[in-house]
Amino acid sequence: MEKKYTVLDLFCGCGGLSKGFEMAGYQILLGVDFNEPALRTYAHNHHGSRTLCGDLSASETFDAIDGILDGKRIDVIIGGPPCQGFSLTGTRQFDDERNKLYLAMIETVRRYKPQAFLIENVPGMATLYKGEVRNEIVRRFTEMGYNVSSQILCSADYGVPQIRKRLVFIGLLNSEESFQFPEPYLKPEEYVTCEQAISDLPSLEHTLGDDVSSYESGPLTEYQKLMRGACEILHNHKSIDHKQFVKDTIALVPDGGNYKDLPEGVGESRKFNMAWTRYASNKPSRTIDTGHRNNFHYKWNRCPTVRESARLQSFPDDFVFLGNKGQQDRQVGNAVPCLMAKAIGVQLHKYLKNEE
Ligand SMILES: C[S@@+](CC[C@H](N)C(=O)[O-])C[C@H]1O[C@@H](n2cnc3c(N)ncnc32)[C@H](O)[C@@H]1O
């Protein structure tokens, strides 16, 4: 049997990144995060991986990781330190504690000397403080013997029905060769659209607020077939019971439209850039957020369900989200799309060596 490279996932959340690496044939030994509901989801969906609930800015967490790994070799460390501090839309405080969390990546890489590491963050980080943050990351890991490459990737290029851009760093230990990021699998005109991604899921027109647990049709597209796999139960497909005025307002917005399409005097309470946006059925979705309720289904007069958002993030249908609705929305919105993570994992495989 082919060797499975071992992985440690830091800031693992519910495990989108881990899921993609698992799909690419890696064995995830441990996921670490301090958010308990996300870790419950992680544990439910990653059988064979351990979880640790710990604060990655505290040194005792690294000792706890040591204890769990118990001398096992780690081939790859992956992680998405929280990006709010780096975000172009959030605060730009360089001293923000959240910015320092990449030190957790440095500390674990120093301890375990994996063959490779991956750090994922928002694209804005590439140019933040005139590129200082990015340069500092490259400098620190280069000093530890890693050949570091970074690139902004777009998830839709790898079959995800969503335009989500992420800055990804890959470091290869003692390597002459730099990592070449995977070429796009699809051209923009071939991108998977919202309709292709979710049109088979029940409309919930008459079941708002109820749980719907069965599919009402077979898969209608290749993407839907892929996401369903052998799954027969429809999980996490429950709509918010919107107030009547929300339903009436969104009913006035056409497929792909937004607040600019509303008649004068309607929907005035939300008038910012993203307000009252309906996904466009014939395009990938915009970046899935953590549940701000500004985005609506391309056809039905409601926000997407957790399952619909999960589909747009390329989580397979048998990946079940636990916790309350708000927690589930955050888990989905925070995740790295599984198919993008898989594409990176598949490419990285080519650079790893079986050291046993
Ligand atoms: C962007 S999400 C990671 C998503 C994940 N990579 C995925 O693909 O699903 C960032 C995660 O960092 C966690 N986090 C933030 N600060 C932390 C800290 N000090 N210690 C541990 N985890 C932390 C959050 O709970 C959140 O789940």
Image (cartoon, rainbow, N blue to C red):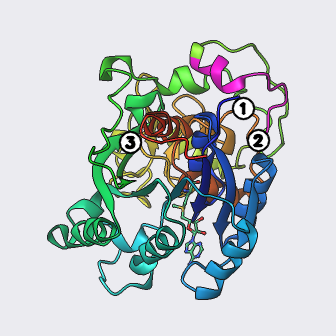
Q: Identify the residue at image location x=58%, y=87%.
A: 59
Residue annotated with mark 2:
208
The amino acid at mark 2 is: Leu
Tell me the CA gap for discs 3 and 2: 23 Å
Give me the C-alpha separation between circle 2 and circle 1: 6 Å
Q: Which image quarter holds the N terminus?
A: top right
Q: Residue at the location (49% across, 46% down)?
A: 295
- Queried whether the magenta region covers residue 113, the answer comes back as no
Residue displayed at 58% across by 14% down: 222
Task: Tell me if I can see residue 304 in this picture.
Answer: no
Q: Up-down: is 34 above or below 235?
A: below
Residue shown at 42% from the left, 70% from the top: 84
Give the residue number, with chain letter if any, for mark 3: 258
At numbered mark 3, what does the secondary structure look like: helix, strand or loop? loop
Instruction: Tell whether label 1 touches label 2 (CB within 8 Å).
Output: yes
The one of 82 and 116 positioned closer to us in this rendering: 116
Looking at this rendering, what residue extends furthest in the left direction?
A: 130
Which residues are the magenta region? 223-235
Disc marking residue 205? 1
Q: In front here: 125 or 306? A: 125
x, y percent for residue 296: 53, 41
**Callout 1, which amino acid?**
Glu
Q: Nearer the viewer, residue 140 or 56?
A: 140
Q: Secondary structure at mark 1?
A: loop
User: Residue 247 vs residue 239: left or right?
Assistant: left
x and y percentages locating residue 301 in the rendered image: 59, 37
Question: Does the numbered disc 1 mark a residue whose Cβ is under 8 Å from ligand 1?
Answer: no
Q: Identity of the amino acid at label 3? A: Asn
Position of residue 316 relative to residue 264, above or below, is above
